[in-house]
Image (cartoon, helix red, strand yellow):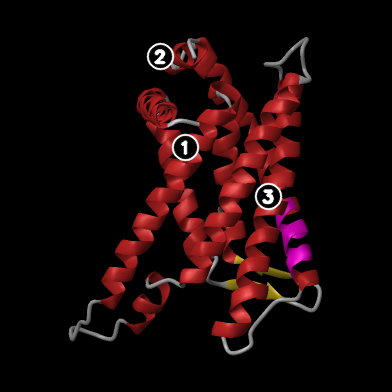
Amino acid sequence: MQMGDIMNKLKYECEAMRILLRSIPATVVTLFVVSVICMNLLANKTLLQLEWIALDGGILISWLSFMCMDIITKHFGPKASNRISILAVVINILTCLIFFVASAIPSNADDYSAFDGVFGGTWFILLGSTIAFLASAIINNTLNFMIGKTFKNNPDGKMAYAMRTYISTFIGQFLDNFIFSLIVFVGFAPIFWDGFCWTVLQCAMCALTGAIVELIMEIAFSPFGYKICKRWKEENVGKDYLEFIEKR
C-alpha cells in the first residue's frame, strides 16, 4: 500500500468517526465508555477464588459493554461498533493515566494510600484488559453481524436479534474473560503480586462462568436493546453515517 493510499484511508476513517459520533445517540456511547472504564477498575478485585473457579469484579458490569456493542452493530454495522470500541479503549487509557497522575501526587492532607492503591492502577491489568477487550469486541461484533445475515426472511425480528446477541455475547464474553485472566493472573500476577496467581483451569472456569452470568444479563436486558434498535430504525437515526458508508 502506497503512502497516498494510507493517507486516503486515514482521512476516510477520521471522517467516518466524525459522522458516527454525530449519529449515535449520546446515551449509548456514554454508557459504553463508562462501562469499559468501570470494568478496568473492578478487575483489580478478585470476588471469588476456589480451586476450580475464580471471578473478578469486572463481571458485574461487562455485560453492559457487550449490550451496547450489540445495539450499535445491529443498527450501524460491525465497523461502527469496532470504531466506538477503539474510542472507548483510548478514553479508558487516558482516564487511567489521569488516575495514575492523581495517585502519584503526594498529599499531606490525609492518608490516601487506599485511594492511591485503587486509582493508581496496575499497568499489566490495563494491558490485559485492553488486549482482551479489543480482541473480544472485534469477534463479538463480527459474529453478531454474520449471524444476523443468516436471518434473510426477517432480519429485524425478535428471534434474529436474540440469536445474534446471545451467541455473540457468550463467545465474546468467554474470550474476553479468558484472555484477560491468562494475561493478568497467569502471566503477570505471579511475578508482581508475591506469587498470587490463578491456574489455567480457574481462568477457563472464570471465563465460562462469567460468560454464562453475562449471557443471563444479556437475556434479561435484550428486550430493551431490541426496542432501542427498533426505535432507531423507525426514527431513521444515524442517516448521515449510513448514507456515508453506502457511498464507499
Left-right relation of 8 to 56: left
Name the foreground residue: 24 vs 86. 86
Q: Mark 2 belongs to which amino acid?
A: Asp
- Sequence-wise, which precedes: disc 3 or disc 1? 1
Indicate yes or no whether the magenta region holds residue 167: no
Q: Secondary structure at mark 1?
A: helix
Q: Residue at x 46, y 11 (%)?
A: 243
Left-right relation of 212 to 90: right
Q: Which residues are magenta?
A: 203-211
**Image x and y of residue 205, in percent:** 78, 64
Q: Residues within 10 Å of mark 3 (few under 14, many from 20)?
A: many
Q: Residue at x 54, y 83 (%)?
A: 192
**Image x and y of residue 208, in percent:** 77, 57
Residue annotated with mark 1: 84
Residue annotated with mark 3: 173
Q: Secondary structure at mark 3?
A: helix
Q: Mark 3 belongs to which amino acid?
A: Gln
- Sequence-wise, which precedes: disc 2 or disc 1? 1
Q: Mark 1 belongs to which amino acid?
A: Ile
Indicate yes or no whether the magenta region holds residue 204: yes
Q: Residues within 10 Å of mark 1 (few under 14, many from 20)?
A: many
Residue annotated with mark 2: 240
Distance CA(mark 2)–CA(mark 1): 17 Å
Q: Residue at x 35, y 27 (%)?
A: 18
